[in-house]
Amino acid sequence: MRDATDQAELVRSGAASPAELVNEAIAAIEATNPELNAVVTPLFDKARAAAAAPDLPEGPFRGVPFLLKDLHCHSEGDPMYEGSRFLKEINWVEREDTVLAARFRAAGFVFCGKTNVPEFGILPTTETEEFGAARNPWNTGHTPGGSSGGSAAAVAAGVVAAAHGNDGGGSIRIPAAHCGLVGLKPSRGRISLGRDMGDVMAGLVNEGVLTRSVRDTASILDAVMGSTPGDPYAAPALPGPLVAELTAEHRPLRIAMRTAPPGRQYETHPDCVEAAQVAARLLESLGHGVDEVELAELDADGVTETFLQRWGAGVAWVLDYWSRRTETTITEDDVEALTEALADLGRGVSAADFLTAVEHHQVLAYKMAAWQEESGYDLILTPTTGEPAPPLGTFATNEEQPLMPIVRATPSAAFTAGMNMTGAPAISLPLHWTAGGLPVGAQLSAPYGREDLLIRVAAQCEEAAPWAGKLPPFTANVREYDL
C-alpha cells in the first residue's frame, strides 16, 4: 500500500491525477464500509469536485484522499455528529473550517468523508447506539480502538493512507496500537484547536493523524502544526522540520522502560509486555541504551481520580456546549447512559475541585520533567495499551452500573493518559503482533516539545523492522495505483 507521500508524488509526477486517486478511495470506502463501518458521513460529491477543481491547493499532499474524524475538527458545509444521535437527528452542519481543517486543505488533502467515533469521543472503542460499531480489519470481531477508531480502521485497511485523529487520553495512540499504525500525540499546543475553542478539557485534548509510515506522520505534522493568535498554549519551537529527523545523524539515547501500569491497578497483558520488550531489543540493536526502571512518579496518588474528575467535567461541558450551539437543551434521553452518567459525575465536581485536579496534573508534569532531566533518560518506553484490542461488546452499556464501561477502559488508557495530563508528546509504533494476529503497540514518550526525538527514533525502528508489508486480512482491493 502506498503511503500519502508516495500518493502525492504520483500527482506531482503526472502518473495519477487527484481525481483518479479520489475516485479510487471512494470505491474503497464503498467496498469496505459495509463490513468496517469506518466512515459515517460520505463526502463523495464534494471530494470529486475538489479534486477536479483548478484551484486545488499546491500543498505537499495535493490530491491525496483524506478522512476527517467526526469530532472537534469540523469542515465548512459538512455534517458534524460526534457519534451523537441528537446531532444526527437535527442534521447539524458546520458553517466553517477549524484552523486544522483549513490547514489540511491548504496541504492539498481532499476530504472524502467523516469517520466513526464513540459518542463525544468518550471511550477507547468505537461503538455507538446511533452509528454502530467500527470494526478492526485485523479481526472484525474486535474493536479498532477509540476514539479515533473509524480513522484507524480505514487507514489500516488501505482505504486512505492517512486520516485525522485527536487524543484526550490515548485516542490516537490506542487505535494505532490496535490497528498496526503509527500514531503520534503531539505536545500540547503543537497544533491549534481554534477557533471555536482554545482548548478541550483544559488541555487534555490534542490533534493529530494516523498513518502507515513515520515519514507521513512527520510530513503531515510539518504541514499543519503551529499556534494561531488567541491559542492558550504554544509548544516550543522545534529545531527544524520533522522530516529532517527521518535521516538525522544517529546518536545513542538513554531510554527508560516500564511495563507495569501506572498505579499498578492490574497486570499488563503478556502480549503488551512483549511488545515493549520487542521494542527494547530493537532499540538496543540500534545502539540505544534501555533500562527497566520503577519510575515511581507514575504511581502518584490521586492520578486516576483526578483524571476522572476532569473527564466527567469535560463531558458535562460538552453537553452544555452543544446545548448552547444548537439552542436546544440536551437531556438524558438524548444521549447514551455512559455519557449521562459521566456528565452527572462532572456536574458534581466543584470549580475548586476541578482546578485542584488540573493542579495535580500540572505538578505531575513538573515531577516527570524533573525526573527525566535528573536521570538523564531521553525517552520513556512502555506498552501503548495494557491489553490487545478487546472483542466488540467489551464496553457495552451497563444500565445498572452506567459508569462501568469507563472503569473497564482503564487497561486501554492507563499508559497513554499520563501524556495528556503532562502535555508531553508520545508515539505508538506497530512492532509486535499477537499469536492470533492482532497488532500490539509500543509507546515512546519524550519531554515536552521534543517530537523531533520521537520521529528520529521511530524512523530508525521502521527502517530496521519495517511494518509496511504487514497487511490485515480485511483490506481494500488492490487497485490501479495500489493506494
Image (cartoon, rainbow, N blue to C red):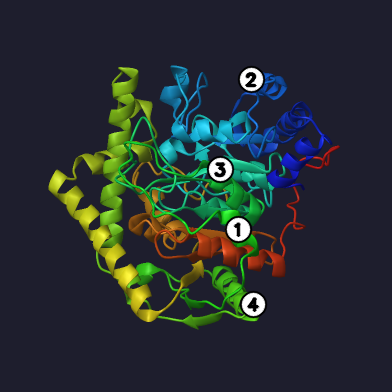
Disc 1 secondary structure class? helix
* Residue at the spot of label 4: 286
Identify the image quadrant of the C terminus: top right
Which one is nearer the viewer's eye here, 279 or 13?
Answer: 13
Q: Which mark is residue 244?
A: 1
Instruction: Confirm or deny contact between disc 4 and disc 3 (CB under 8 A).
Output: no
Which one is nearer the viewer's eye here, 341 or 229?
Answer: 229
Q: Which mark is residue 46?
A: 2
Relative to residue 307, is residue 182 drawn left or right?
right
Name which of mark 4 and mark 2 comes first in the sequence. Answer: 2
Instruction: Confirm or deny contact between disc 3 and disc 1 (CB under 8 A).
Output: no
Name which of mark 3 and mark 2 comes first in the sequence. Answer: 2
Nearer the camera: disc 3 or disc 2: 3
Q: Amino acid at mark 2?
A: Lys
Quadrant in the rendering for residue 159 = top right
Disc 3 secondary structure class? helix
Q: Amino acid at mark 1?
A: Ala
Instruction: List x then y, in percent, for residue 132.
Output: 55, 34
Disc 2 secondary structure class? helix
Q: Residues within 10 Å of mark 4 (few under 14, many from 20)?
A: some
Whole-number angstrom distance, CA of label 3 to CA of label 1: 13 Å
* Residue at the spot of label 3: 223
Q: How many marks?
A: 4
Q: Amino acid at mark 4?
A: Leu
